[in-house]
Image (cartoon, helix red, strand yellow):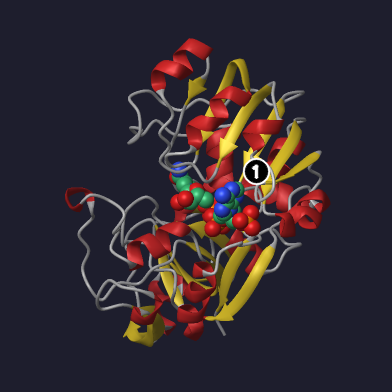
């Protein structure tokens, strides 16, 4: 078993800076302040965070999951620190951790989907080693922090589910479909999930149609999409047909409009809660399927190899210092996100 000095724990201070909230609310509840240093449990790695990206669950939780019925809202303890997706350097490891050593650069999505347990908007975060992978050497911490949740969502929807946990959205497990030579439409293509989805679908050999606002066209064509539809001018469902798969990152009550663009035996994958008419889908022979992303260091290592080779890249919408998490959340509220918003930690 490693000694305390060898694991790096002996050298750490008792406090750090973090962004915390003491109540639910808008961006103004995010406060940069002193917080206790996380303690390490068995199997965990302490990361000195260099960058942490924003994801929709951050603002859902900041707000107290207001969009859910009261009985579904998770209960959390205040003060609360948001943030799942980090990139940084290993500062200490629990004595039983074999896969990572002090000083290594790592990235990961920490403890998702456990609500309120991730705590990445901080100088240090403790993470299960199994949630982490080595940071690709050719990209910086900002890009690496942008990859985990969006990238794993695409991986688990389109490439490989990679776990046997119960699906909270449907009785059966989600099953990706083959993409090679297929016609794939990605709605919300410029966002965190969408911009990685178009690249991973291209990598798998699909013909990719991207749907986004007109200002995203140059960006998405630069990522290799074959066709672009500006949803502010033309509803995609009016102009495309014979699609094999729709990945709808927007979803919600309007996702059912994509049933009519799909071939028989096609698939509609809403990434957020989708409400397609199950009877209509069955009549048309279309599979509608959802899943919830889960932390997975192994899959992240595979994605990391594509990032390292430059096959897939993480686009950065904007960066903000950790102390300006509030401004980063205000940027979210303005919409039209292109890639990822990332907080940098000095
Ligand atoms: N199932 C899961 O486990 C899972 C995991 C991750 C995320 N999600 C969900 O997936 C959704 C997307 O996440 P994200 O991180 O990609 O969000 P995001 O980065 O905020 O991106 C949203 C994108 O949607 C585009 N958009 C907005 N209105 C649109 C419209 N009417 N039609 C087409 N595109 C539109 C926006 O840009 P433009 O308007 O400029 O095109 C933006 O690029 C969220 O609801 C999130 O909660 C689910």
Which quadrant would the C terminus be assigned to in this image?
bottom right
**Residue lying at 81% horizontally and 45% vertically, measured from the top left:** 224
Q: Is residue 26 above or below residue 12?
A: above
Going by the picture, which residue comes out furthest to the left?
71
Q: How many marks?
A: 1
**Residue lying at 63% horizontally and 25% vertically, measured from the top left:** 261
Residue 216: image quadrant is bottom right
| Closer-to-camera residue (138/167) | 167
Would you name the residue on which mark 1 appears? 197
The reply to whether residue 127 is visible in this rendering is no
Q: Is residue 108 above or below residue 78?
A: above
The reply to whether residue 146 is visible in this rendering is yes
**Residue lying at 65% horizontally and 47% vertically, measured from the top left:** 231
**Residue lying at 33% horizontally and 24% vertically, measured from the top left:** 171
Instruction: Please provide percent x and percent y for residue 83.
Output: 43, 66
119 horizontally vs 281: left or right: left
Q: Is residue 284 above or below residue 16?
A: above
Instruction: Please provide percent x and percent y for residue 175.
Output: 50, 25
Residue 11: image quadrant is bottom left
| Closer-to-camera residue (202/42) | 202
Q: Secondary structure at mark 1?
A: helix
């Amino acid at each position: 078993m490693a000694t305390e000095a060898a694991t790096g724990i002996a050298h750490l201070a008792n406090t750090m800076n973090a962004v915390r909230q003491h109540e639910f609310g808008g961006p103004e509840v995010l406060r940069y302040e002193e917080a206790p240093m996380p303690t390490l449990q068995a199997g965990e790695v302490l990361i000195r965070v260099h960058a942490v990206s924003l994801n929709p669950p951050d603002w859902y939780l900041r707000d107290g999951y207001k969009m859910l019925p009261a009985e579904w809202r998770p209960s959390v303890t205040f003060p609360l620190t948001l943030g799942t997706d980090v990139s940084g350097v290993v500062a200490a490891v629990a004595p039983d951790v074999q896969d990572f050593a002090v000083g290594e650069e790592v990235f990961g999505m920490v403890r998702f989907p456990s609500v309120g347990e991730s705590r990445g908007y901080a100088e240090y975060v403790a993470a299960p080693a199994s949630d982490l992978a080595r940071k690709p050497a050719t990209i910086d911490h900002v890009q690496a922090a942008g990859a985990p949740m969006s990238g794993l969502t695409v991986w688990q929807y389109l490439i490989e589910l990679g776990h046997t946990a119960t699906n909270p959205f449907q009785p059966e497990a989600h099953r990706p479909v083959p993409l090679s030579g297929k016609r794939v439409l990605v709605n919300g293509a410029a966002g965190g999930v969408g911009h990685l989805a178009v690249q991973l679908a291209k990598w798998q050999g699909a013909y990719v149609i991207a749907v986004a606002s007109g200002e995203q066209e140059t960006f998405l064509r630069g990522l290799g999409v074959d066709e672009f539809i500006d949803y502010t001018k033309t509803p995609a469902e009016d102009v495309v047909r014979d699609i094999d798969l729709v990945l709808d990152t927007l979803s919600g009550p309007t996702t059912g409009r994509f049933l009519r663009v799909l071939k028989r035996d096609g698939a509609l994958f809403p990434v957020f809660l989708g409400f397609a008419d199950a009877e209509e889908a069955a009549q048309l022979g279309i599979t509608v399927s959802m899943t919830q992303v889960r932390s997975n260091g192994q899959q992240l290592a595979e994605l990391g190899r594509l990032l390292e080779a430059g096959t897939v890249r993480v686009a950065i919408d904007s960066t903000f210092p950790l102390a300006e998490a509030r401004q980063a959340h205000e940027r979210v509220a303005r919409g039209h996100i292109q890639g990822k918003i990332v907080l940098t930690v000095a």
